[in-house]
Image (cartoon, rainbow, N blue to C red):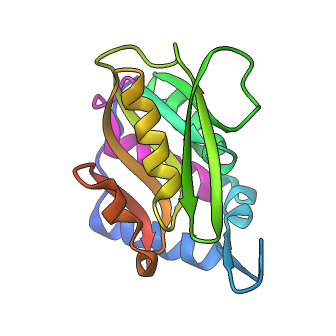
């Protein structure tokens, strides 16, 4: 794959604007008091989705050997970005979804706790891995995915998300890992 020309600041600002305009807030989901950031409208817009993926590819071309996507929405754009980058894709799944030997990490969310897993042979020692998800909130899921990558011997090259909810401070749980978000606020 050849790298796309770098995007201008104006193009990035226009993309951020268009993504913000497309996002939908769903109040009291998955529980009362939580405002869920729904990326479905972004996914419904083929041009907008393609621009989002192109931005990820532009930022990470030649820097990563694999993309790890976090269940479930991280699978959608993360797998397309991996394809466009010309690298493999690794799913990080909720507990009980993977059939082979796996590493498991328990972590806390802003509204509870969860467990994620990854096959033990998904990442080879020394591989540079981009962790991709739709939203960075409290940082628990991204930190758990980074832990899984490290358990396999991989190097976390960065965490890339569509949306970062800065008020929840998730970036701080990823100390030392470069974090990039398209939309922050």
Q: Is residue 147 magenta?
A: no
Is most of the magenta stretch helix, strand or loop? helix
Residue 175 x/y as whole percent? 26, 55
Q: Quadrant of residue 131?
A: top left
Q: Nearer the viewer, residue 108 or 149?
A: 108
Identity of the residue drawn at 40% across and 62% down: 181
Q: Nearer the viewer, residue 63 or 141?
A: 141
Q: Specify the quadrant that holds the N terminus.
A: top left
Question: From this viewpoint, is residue 173 visible?
Answer: yes
Q: Specify the quadrant that holds the C terminus.
A: bottom left
Q: Which residues are magenta?
A: 48-65
Q: Is residue 31 left or right of residue 75?
A: right
Residue 125 x/y as whole percent? 33, 15
Q: Is residue 130 left or right of residue 8?
A: right
Q: Residue furthest left?
A: 176
Q: Is residue 124 left or right of residue 32?
A: left
């Amino acid at each position: 794959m050849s790298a796309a020309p770098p995007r201008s600041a104006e193009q990035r600002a226009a993309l951020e604007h268009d993504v913000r305009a497309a996002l939908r807030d769903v109040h009291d989901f998955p529980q009362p008091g939580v405002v869920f950031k729904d990326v479905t409208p972004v996914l419904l817009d083929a041009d907008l989705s393609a621009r989002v993926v192109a931005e990820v590819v532009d930022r990470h071309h030649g820097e990563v050997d694999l993309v790890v996507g976090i269940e479930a929405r991280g699978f959608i754009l993360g797998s397309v970005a991996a394809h466009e980058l010309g690298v493999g894709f690794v799913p990080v799944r909720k507990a009980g979804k993977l059939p082979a030997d796996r590493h498991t990490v328990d972590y806390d969310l802003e509204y509870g706790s969860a467990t994620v897993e990854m096959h033990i042979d998904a990442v080879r020692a020394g591989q540079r891995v981009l962790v991709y998800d739709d939203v960075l909130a409290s940082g628990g899921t991204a930190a758990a995915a980074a832990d899984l990558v490290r358990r396999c011997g991989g190097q976390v090259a960065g965490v890339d998300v569509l949306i970062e909810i800065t008020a929840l401070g998730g970036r701080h749980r990823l100390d030392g890992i470069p974090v990039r978000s398209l939309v922050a606020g």
